[in-house]
Image (tube, grey):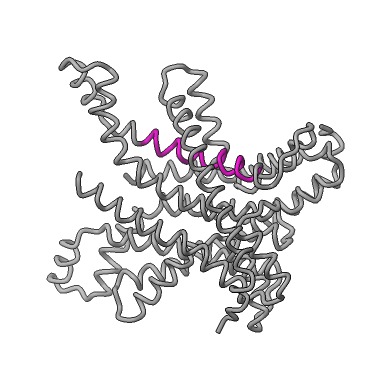
Amino acid sequence: MDFANAFSSDNLLFILDGFYMTLKVAFISIVLSFILGSVVGAVRYMKLPVLSPALGLIVEVLRNLPLLLIIFFARFALPDIGIQLGPMNATIVALTLFEGAMISEIVRSGLNSIDKGQIEAARSSGLGYLQTLWHIVLPQGLRRMVPPLVSQFISLLKDTSLAVVISLPELMNQSKIVSAQNQNYVIPVLLLAAVLYFAVNYALSLVARRLEARIV
Amino acid sequence: MPDFSILTEYFDVYLEGFLNTIYASVLALLGSFALGTVLAVFRISSVKPLQWLGTVYVEFIRNIPLLLVVYLFYLSLPTIGITLNGFVSGTIGLTVYTAAFIAEAIRAGILSVSKGQSEAALSSGLTYVQTMRYVVLPQAIKIVIPPLSNQFINLVKNSSVLSVIAGLDLMYFGDRVASKTYATFDTYIFIAVFYLALTLPLSYAALRLERRLAKQG
């Protein structure tokens, strides 16, 4: 193990570049998958004819596939039907679809957890269906969704490492490249990557725990 | 319409990967169940160093990517003279990673049974083992089974990381078919169907089991 040379300034900068890419891709995918998941979850909750069951089927398929396959698919199979995506866009698309499916289930069960009596009460006191959703169901449902959402975001951040298979220059990929220079670099570099991932995720999970304590 | 001749021509290749995926998932489930139980017991024990060890393990592993855990075994061990093939180091990585999640599920299950119950059982004359066997564990298992079955589904999906280190799993062989036939789209669809053939029935069974256990109260 050669910590001094493994962590030369060039190597460190190279790895930190990857860390920045990881954070960037994770942030964009968190925002997009949250939007997608909320819309899909709400539509499934409303039990619209045709649309809700169709989305339900897509969600079930996506949730039951390995994310790695979806990433490969976005990068290497979509060109067969005329959609060319670079490594970063392919990763974002794959993460958004997969985590969006996961998030839609969190949103749906959050909305479902609101007592039907409350909805009936709101409706009979004169609120419309959408008003009831917006003023009664959503504020309470959202509060219950926060803890599982944060753990899903942690999963998403960890899952960005899978983009190594399509050579996205993120933390895992850059660490692997540096560690391939010299076999004495492998353990120090992998440990550094572990510490970086751990730091972000642990911070997120502390936030989740505080939110959980405040809400419940 | 996908080209089914790929499926018939390379069926043996797909099948070998499919079976290896099942094999790796089952091995990792058994291993992580054993390791997870030990870790859960460590975390609820009154011995401080064991508590500390269990907590550090679970918190550290849960917050780093599975792929990194797998690389730690696949890339680091050779530098200290231990070389494992992709399948073995991948399965060990899966076991080590999943154990952290299973430990949390088991710990939550045991803690969910209120202390008053075991105290009542003990004071009504049951021994410690009887209390565990007849009072605590039957209730704890109901809490533990749903997250455990979900972990198994996750294991099947997560085992696809074996393909990154030539672990001979379904994703690995499927990808080889893709590079041979150049029909990437169709080949990947078939890989997806093989995965779904495993995970959809498992998800359905897990959901039913969860509902049945919830109904029993």
Residue beneath the point at 37% across and 62% down = A107
- Placement of B39 over or under A12, stated as above or below: above
Residue A202 appears in the figure: no
| Residue B199 falls in image quadrant | bottom left
- Residue A61, image x and y in percent? 46, 68
Residue B90 appears in the figure: yes
Task: Tell whether B38 sits left or right of B130.
Answer: right
- Residue A112, image x and y in percent? 28, 61
Decide whether residue B131 is among the magenta residues.
no
Pick the residue in front: B11 or A11.
Answer: B11
Q: Residue furthest left?
A: A124
- Residue B8, image x and y in percent? 59, 74
Report the span colored magenta: B89-108
Residue beneath the point at 35% across and 40% down = B144
Image quadrant containing the N terminus of chain B: bottom right
Residue beneath the point at 43% across and 68% down = A59
| Residue A200 falls in image quadrant | top right
- Placement of A195 over or under A31, stated as above or below: above
Main secondary structure type of the part rendered in magenta: helix
- Residue A26, image x and y in percent? 60, 58
Q: How many marks?
A: 0
Residue beneath the point at 46% across and 24% down = B42
- Placement of B148 over or under B14, stated as above or below: above
Image quadrant containing the C terminus of chain B: top left
- Placement of A91 over or under B150, stated as above or below: below
Pick the residue in front: A213 or A165.
Answer: A165
Task: Tell whether A184 sits left or right of B101.
Answer: right
Task: Tell whether A128 sits left or right of A192.
Answer: left
